[in-house]
Image (tube, helix red, strand yellow):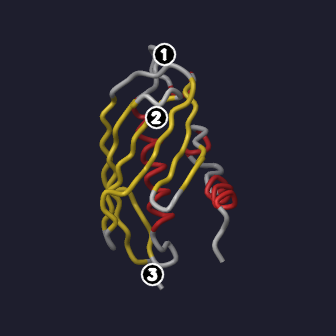
């Protein structure tokens, strides 16, 4: 039985309890057949000392949404997924509001995956472009 989109979003957000995603207030907000979207508030908790969004927090959002996408679109009953590399090009500073990460696959292989993750602000301005490589390995039976 397939979960409804609403139930799937609730399930994904519930597994974030007591993790970095909860600490950074990352919430999965949308999903489709080939994408996943998450939101993170920009406030003093994720600022650099000069009051703008920290690139490390942006990378944490990107890796979170990309890893969730790999888990969601691969058969996690048979494999476990781990991130192997992340890159982030920061294009715009953000002081407040929210940022949104949309993860889509550039490559979805049986063993390796490559995701494109676009980070935008509340006005849909491009903030960062990230790439995440993941690997899926068989679970021991």
- Count residues near mark 2 (Cα–Cα under 10 Å), then give few for <14, some for 14-19, many for 20+: some
Please state the horizontal and vertical placement of residue 123, each as a whole percent of the image: 50, 26
As drawn, the label of residue 140 is 3
Q: Which of the labelled discs sits on residue 120, or is there none?
A: none
Circle 3 residues within 10 Å: few <14, some 14–19, many ≥20: few
Q: For numbered disc 3, what is the local secondary structure?
A: loop
Label 1: few (<14), some or many (≥20) within 10 Å? some
Q: Give yes or no for contact between labels 2 and 3 (Cβ–Cβ under 8 Å).
A: no
Residue underneath mark 2 = 57
Q: Is residue 116 left or right of residue 54?
A: left
Residue at 37% from the left image edge and 34% from the top image edge:
128
Q: Residue at x 44, y 14 (%)?
A: 50
The residue depicted at 33 percent of the width and 27 percent of the height is: 91
Relative to the observer, which residue lies in front, 129 or 63? 129
Task: From this view, report whether residue 23 is shown above or below residue 137.
Answer: above
Whole-number angstrom distance, CA of label 3 to CA of label 1: 46 Å
The location of residue 67, given as percent across then percent down, is: 45, 56
First in sequence: mark 2 or mark 1? 1
Choose top left, top right, bottom left or bottom right for residue 126. Answer: top left
Q: Quadrant of the N terminus?
A: bottom right
């Amino acid at each position: 039985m397939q979960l409804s989109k609403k139930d799937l979003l609730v399930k994904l957000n519930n597994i974030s309890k007591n993790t970095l995603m909860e600490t950074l207030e990352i919430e999965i907000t949308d999903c489709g057949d080939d994408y996943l979207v998450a939101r993170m508030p920009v406030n003093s908790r994720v600022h650099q000392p000069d009051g703008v969004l920290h690139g490390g927090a942006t990378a944490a959002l990107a890796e979170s949404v990309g890893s969730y996408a790999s888990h969601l679109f691969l058969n996690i009953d048979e494999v476990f997924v781990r991130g192997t590399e992340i890159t982030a090009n920061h294009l715009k500073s953000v002081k407040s509001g929210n940022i949104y990460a949309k993860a889509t696959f550039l490559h979805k292989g049986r063993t390796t995956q490559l995701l494109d993750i676009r980070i935008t602000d509340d006005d849909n301005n491009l903030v960062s472009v990230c790439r995440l490589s993941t690997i899926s390995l068989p679970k021991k039976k």
